[in-house]
Image (cartoon, rainbow, N blue to C red):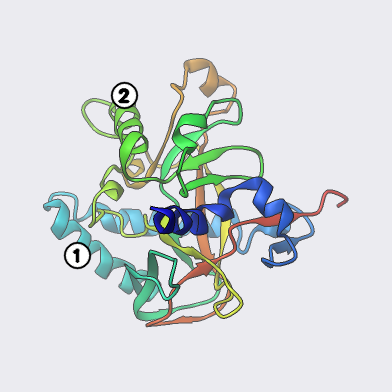
Amino acid sequence: MFQRILKRWSQYKYRFVPWIANNLNENHPRLVPSVLEDKVVSDDVIEHTLLTVFQKFNSTSSLHRTEQNVRNVDILFKELGYKTDRRKSCLSDGGRGVFVTDGTVKPGTLVSLYPGLVYQPWEPVFWVSLANPFLFRCADGVHIDGKDTGLSKMMYNSCARRDGVMGELMCDTSWLVEKPVNPLAVGQYVNNQTEEFPANVAYQEFDVPVSFPVHLRKYFPNTEARLQTDMDQQLGQMLLRLVVLVSLREVQAGEELFSTYYTIVSSNQ
């Protein structure tokens, strides 16, 4: 029992703010001088990549989910030059990780999305945060719950059905199973860097613009916990928060992806 608790803590501690604060020097945080310089590539590049890939995914939408996954993995290889998969991590306490299985990831390439239910800063996340190593906190206090089991899974499925339009979902729920329709939706399984395995990808926050085609939103593995209203739309608050992972260098087939679980942005810039 003690070993199980210790193993879970070893994975969870990088999401636990007090532990992070006491171990900044030891764990090599990613340092950036401003929020804008936190971005590896521009938002326009992210949007263009998502539009291109999702349009291709849409051509397979009539197939069974498993077949869609196979075809969409091939689409990613053709469009972006690589394939990824979840496998046992190189780290002894890393559980499953994400590996490049074919091709080469070029620097500045979108490699995955962080799926999950999006909570605004004022929304409570206490219950879903318990023993949850997949709760991602954005710079502005927005949280994304990427856990694919238990209460988190139930909450995501409930909100996904709530936000459907004319029987069509406005988000992807297949990231909750082993072979997702959108094979990019595995970012929650990317492990934290170590001295032996420094980060080769970085998190980047991205707000999906209102103008993004409605018929392609079904490939976003994220939806809001709150029910958005007409007033939200009038105030321009219908933007969906995404967290994407972008490569920092060339990554070859056989390499595991590693990120930095926290980034320090200077407050005096």
Position in image of residue 105 (x %, y %):
45, 76
- In front: 221, or 42? 221
Q: Secondary structure at mark 2?
A: helix
**Mark sitting on residue 142:** none
Q: Around disc 2, counting alpha carbons within 10 Å, would you say few (fewer than 14), some (14 to 19), or many (20 or more)?
A: few
Give whichever of discs 1 and 2 has the lower sequence position.
1
Q: Is residue 134 left or right of residue 169?
A: right
Does 64 sit above or below residue 259?
above
* Front-lying residue, 255 or 234: 255
Residue 70 marker:
1
- Report x, y in % for residue 170: 33, 35
Seen in the picture, residue 119 relative to 261 is either above or below; the reply is above
Q: Amino acid at mark 1?
A: Val
Is residue 103 shown to the viewer in this render?
A: yes
Q: Residue at x 55, y 48 (%)?
A: 206
**Three-letter code, disc 2:** Arg
**What separation in Å lies between label 1 and label 2 (alpha carbons)?**
29 Å
Q: In the image, residue 226 lies at what x, y percent?
A: 46, 24
Q: Which mark is residue 162?
A: 2
Say left or right for 144 vs 60: right
Q: Residue at x 75, y 65 (%)?
A: 25
